[in-house]
Image (cartoon, rainbow, N blue to C red):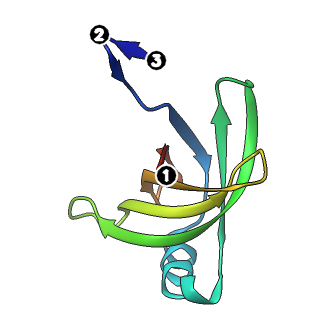
Amino acid sequence: MSQRGQVFPQIFPILQGPGKWDLLTAFGNANAGQVVEFQYFDSDSRMKLRTGATIRSLSHEGDSGEVWNLVAIVKMPAGHPGRISGYYNTRARNGHFTIIA
């Protein structure tokens, strides 16, 4: 999608994901290959999809201790790995992400 030559990244809604303990454990064990699963909606295919994510970066958003900014390596639907950047709420277990280079 573009407007006056600008390209806007596609935003994928996260429908379901890990709780706080699982997210923090996966981040702590990322070098050992531990993954967490996210369910998301792909508006292009109009399907709910699942992917395993290796959490590479995690930071708090706000003071609640339940909202996070994350960067992860995921297996894309085509089978190749991709990097995502996202916002995730462990209490509501939802958020969104974009694919990054």
Q: Name the residue under label 2.
A: 4
Residue 37 image label: none
Q: Mark 3 points at which residue?
A: 1
Residue 94 rendering spot, x and y as whole percentages: 52, 48
- Inter-mark Cα distance, 3 to 2: 10 Å
Tag 1, which secondary structure? Answer: loop
At label 3, the amino acid type is Met
Q: How far apart are marks 3 and 1 (CA)?
A: 29 Å
With respect to residue 76, does 21 lie above or below? Answer: below
| Left or right side of 39 for 79 | right
Tell me: residue 3, above or below residue 101: above
What's the residue at 26%, 59% (across, down)?
A: 61
Asked whether 3 or 57 is in front, the reply is 3
Disc with the residue nearer the chain's start (3 vs 1): 3
Q: Position of residue 56 (x, y in %)?
A: 47, 72
Q: In this view, does 98 lie to the left or right of 58?
A: right
Residue drawn at (48%, 79%), measured in percent from left and top?
A: 24
- What separation in Å lies between label 2 and label 1 (alpha carbons)? 36 Å
Q: Which of marks 2 and 1 is in front?
A: 2
Mark 3 Cα within 10 Å, few/some/many (few <14, many 20+)? few
Q: Tell me the amino acid under the disc marked 1.
A: Ala
Q: On the image, numbered disc 1 is attached to which residue? A: 92
Residue at 43% across, 51% down: 86
Residue contact between numbered discs 2 and 1, judged by CB atoms under 8 Å:
no
